[in-house]
């Protein structure tokens, strides 16, 4: 099956022939947009929403597809949990029971990868949070737990564009500034 974001406001599930199996529109405020999507093998659907570039308003949701009756053609969805990741959610990836989140904090010129465990429970646990080059586009974990991160080329990374000076707290010799 394939899941897709539908017009920044909904999620659609298709089978291998392209037939729509399920469509879901979460209750979003008019200014909220679904930015990224991930699914797990147990029917969990994760998505990150943004409100413009406001880091304080970004959220990650987990909905569960549930079918109370085997005769029911369209599964229902229940909100399982919601977290505020303290940044814009750029990408989500599920691997081995963990949710990997690429987060930008544009107002600070910082990006992070946040890893949540216990995502099948009602309260996910933030297992790790670490800095990566800004801005971040994508995170992809492999089966060993190693993570690959993609970021656009940025020759000014780690420097104030106004003065050409290193930003406070950033070591110009660090990989984060290259």
Image (cartoon, helix red, strand yellow):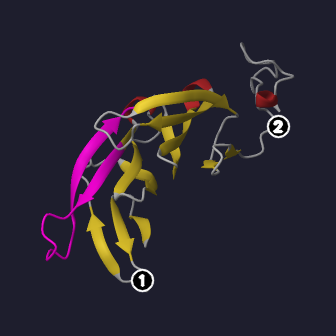
Q: Is residue 29 in view from this perspective? A: no
Q: Residues within 10 Å of mark 2 (few under 14, many from 20)?
A: few
| Residue located farthest toward the right when viewing the structure as drawn | 173
Q: Residue shown at 43%/86% (left/top)?
A: 17
Element marked by disc 1: loop
Disc 1 from disc 2: Cα separation: 42 Å
| Residue 128 colored in magenta in the image | no
Residue 51 pos. (x, y %): 39, 41
Question: Would you place residue 31 above or below residue 84 in this image?
Answer: below
Circle on res. 143: none
Residue 104 pos. (x, y %): 56, 35
Q: Which residue is mark 2?
A: 155
- Drawn side of residue 19 relative to residue 91, left or right: left
Residue 78 pos. (x, y %): 21, 52
Residue toward you, 75 or 52: 75
Residue toward you, 2 or 90: 2
| Residue 70 colored in magenta in the image | yes
Q: Which residues are magenta?
A: 61-84
How many marks overall?
2
In which quadrant of the rendered image does the C terminus lie?
Answer: top right
Specify the quadrant of the image occupied by residue 83: top left
Element marked by disc 2: loop
Q: Earlier in the sequence, mark 1 or mark 2?
A: 1
| Closer to viewer: mark 1 or mark 2 | 1
Residue 108 pos. (x, y %): 59, 24
Question: Would you place residue 69 above or below residue 57 in this image?
Answer: below
Q: Residue shown at 84%/21% (left/top)?
A: 172
Q: Is residue 30 in view from this perspective? A: yes
Q: Residue shown at 28%/68% (left/top)?
A: 23
Residue toward you, 123 or 60: 123
Q: Residue shown at 45%/32% (left/top)?
A: 55
Q: Which residue is mark 1?
A: 18
């Amino acid at each position: 099956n394939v899941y897709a974001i539908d017009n920044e406001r909904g999620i659609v599930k298709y089978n291998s022939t392209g037939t729509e199996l399920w469509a879901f529109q979460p209750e979003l405020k008019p200014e909220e947009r679904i930015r990224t999507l991930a699914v797990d093998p147990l029917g969990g659907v994760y998505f990150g929403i943004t409100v413009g570039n406001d880091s304080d308003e970004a959220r990650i949701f987990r909905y569960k597809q549930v079918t109370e009756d085997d005769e029911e053609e369209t599964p229902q969805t229940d909100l399982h949990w919601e977290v505020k990741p303290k940044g814009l959610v750029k990408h989500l990836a599920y691997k081995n029971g963990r949710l990997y989140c690429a987060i930008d904090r544009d107002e600070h010129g910082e990006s992070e990868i946040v890893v949540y465990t216990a995502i099948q429970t009602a309260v996910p646990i933030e297992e790790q949070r670490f800095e990566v080059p800004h801005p971040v586009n994508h995170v992809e974990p492999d089966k060993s737990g190693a993570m690959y991160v993609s970021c656009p080329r940025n020759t000014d990374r780690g420097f104030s564009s106004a003065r050409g000076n290193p930003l406070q707290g950033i070591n110009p010799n660090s990989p984060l500034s290259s």
